[in-house]
């Protein structure tokens, strides 16, 4: 079984389960992207979060609780709704098909073993109009040995979430299907997911430098700084930067 609601209830505890039921019952789960492999939903809590239920079993949510526990009320709400509206059947169907032995063999031989990709954060401080307090932008570099600048952060997230390929020139190709990140780097990616899904319209309108160096409003800036203990980062400008000191 792809999703066992009873097990989710047991693991989550009664209080969060009830909260999830309330959100699901009032229609607070909206599917924004539906494929045979996954169901992407916005769950209308305050603040809203974005969940992915996947036929492959790698579910995810943008909330911090999920980052720590691997399960949350958003996943529960999305799963309940998915059971009611047939989404779960669709994912189960995909899973059953891909688990057919012949297919499995083909897939196993075609897919390299999972590998871990490195991320490095670039922090750029810049003056903001009308205040002494500078704003913060962040960019990412990605790679296995050498690191490459991510030209569009929304595009990287899409590649991860959809399991597609993103090329970084000759040196590196990111395969969303099987490349993985360390838990600390996942948290950084989750922060970006939350940022982008909080304002999808604005994200669509990002161009050029704003795509690779996104402006972090509070409390995202603070959230990111608290993550830098475990994630590699550099500080400065795009042209000139140096490795960051431990934050704490
Ligand atoms: Zn969540």
Image (cartoon, rainbow, N blue to C red):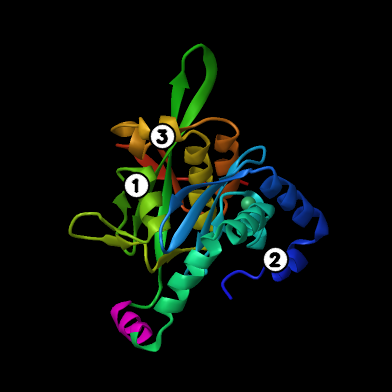
Return the disc, 2 or 3, that comes first in the chain's sequence: 2
Which of the marked residues, 3 or 1, is nearer the chain's N terminus? 1
Q: Position of residue 202 (x, y in %)?
A: 42, 30
Task: Say which label, 2 or 1, has the lower sequence index.
Answer: 2
Label 2 vs label 3: CA separation?
32 Å
Does 6 sit left or right of 83 as displayed?
A: right
What residue do we see at 74% from left, 47% from top?
Answer: 22
Residue 191 in the image: x percent, y percent? 53, 45
Question: Would you say residue 189 is visible in this rendering?
Answer: yes
Whether residues under marks 3 and 1 lie with C-beta atoms below 8 angstroms apart, the answer is: no
Q: Which residue is mark 2?
A: 8
Q: Residues within 10 Å of mark 3 (few under 14, many from 20)?
A: some
Q: Position of residue 66 (x, y in %)?
A: 63, 56
Q: Is residue 100 left or right of residue 67?
A: left
- Residues in magenta? 103-111
Q: Secondary structure at mark 2?
A: helix
Residue drawn at 32 percent across, 47 percent down: 150
- Residue drawn 62% across the image and 56% down it: 75
Q: Nearer the viewer, residue 83 or 53?
A: 83
- Find out whether the residues at labels 2 and 3 contact each other: C-beta distance under 8 Å: no
- Residue at image mark 3: 203
Q: Is residue 214 above or below residue 9?
A: above
């Amino acid at each position: 079984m792809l999703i066992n609601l009873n097990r989710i209830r047991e693991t989550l505890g009664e209080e969060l389960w009830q909260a999830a039921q309330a959100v699901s019952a009032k229609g607070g789960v909206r599917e924004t992207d539906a494929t045979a492999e996954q169901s992407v939903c916005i769950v209308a809590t305050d603040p809203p979060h974005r969940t992915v239920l996947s036929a492959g079993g790698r579910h995810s949510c943008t909330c911090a609780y999920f980052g720590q526990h691997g399960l949350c009320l958003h996943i529960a709400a999305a799963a309940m709704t998915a059971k009611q509206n047939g989404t779960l059947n669709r994912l189960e169907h995909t899973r059953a098909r891909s688990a057919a032995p012949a297919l499995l063999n083909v897939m196993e031989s075609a897919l390299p073993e999972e590998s871990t990709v490195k991320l490095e954060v670039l922090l750029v401080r810049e003056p903001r109009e009308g205040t002494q307090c500078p704003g913060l932008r962040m960019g990412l570099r990605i790679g296995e040995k050498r690191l490459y600048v991510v030209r569009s952060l929304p595009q990287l997230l899409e590649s991860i979430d959809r399991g597609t390929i993103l090329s970084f020139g000759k040196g590196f190709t990111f395969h969303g299907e099987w490349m993985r990140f360390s838990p600390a780097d996942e948290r950084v990616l989750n922060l970006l997911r939350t940022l982008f899904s909080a304002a999808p319209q604005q994200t669509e309108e990002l161009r050029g430098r704003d795509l690779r160096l996104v402006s972090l409003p509070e409390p995202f800036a603070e959230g990111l700084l608290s993550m830098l203990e475990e994630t590699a980062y550099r500080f400065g400008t795009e042209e000139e930067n140096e490795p960051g000191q431990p934050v704490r």
